[in-house]
Amino acid sequence: MVRFWDPAYQCFTFNQEDMTPTIEEYASLLHIDNVQLNKIYVKEPKPMTFMKKLMKLTGMTDT
């Protein structure tokens, strides 16, 4: 199966057909038992603001 996985498109490619795993298939592949099917899974972004980036670069603290 690994040879059919296309990491650029994040899907399996068989000749001219593309197949994307479902949530259930991802859970099975990753051995995750507690997947809630009616829940949306997203990674919560924690963007660093310009001011915080500038403070980090200059070594300043937020006090």
Image (tube, rainbow, N blue to C red):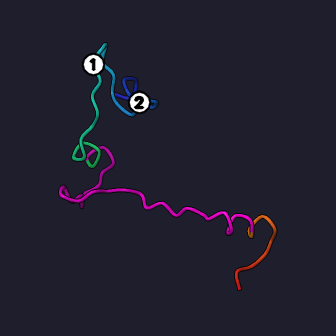
Using the image as rendered, state which of residue 25 and residue 61 is in the foreground.
61
Residue on which the image places disc 2: 9
Using the image as rendered, state which of residue 30 and residue 6 is in the foreground.
6
Tell me which segment is drawn in magenta.
Answer: 28-54
Main secondary structure found in the magenta portion: loop
Identify whether 27 is placed above or below 38: above
Q: Secondary structure at mark 2?
A: loop
Q: Residue furthest bottom?
A: 63
**Image quadrant of residue 12?**
top left
Does the stretch in magenta take in 52?
A: yes
Task: Name the amino acid, label 2.
Answer: Tyr
Quadrant that contains the N terminus: top left
**Image quadrant of residue 20?**
top left
Identify whether 24 is placed above or below 5: below
Using the image as rendered, state which of residue 7 and residue 56 is in the foreground.
56
- CA gap between label 1 and label 2 equals 12 Å
Q: Residue furthest top?
A: 15
Does the stretch in magenta take in 40?
A: yes
> Which residue is at 18% across, 55% downward?
37
* Residue 17 marker: 1
Where residue 52 appears, as percent x and y from the top left, is 67, 69
Task: Name the amino acid, label 1.
Answer: Glu
* Circle 1 residues within 10 Å: few <14, some 14–19, many ≥20: few
Disc with the residue nearer the chain's start (1 vs 2): 2
Where residue 36 appears, as percent x and y from the top left, is 21, 60
> Which residue is at 35% across, 31% downward?
11
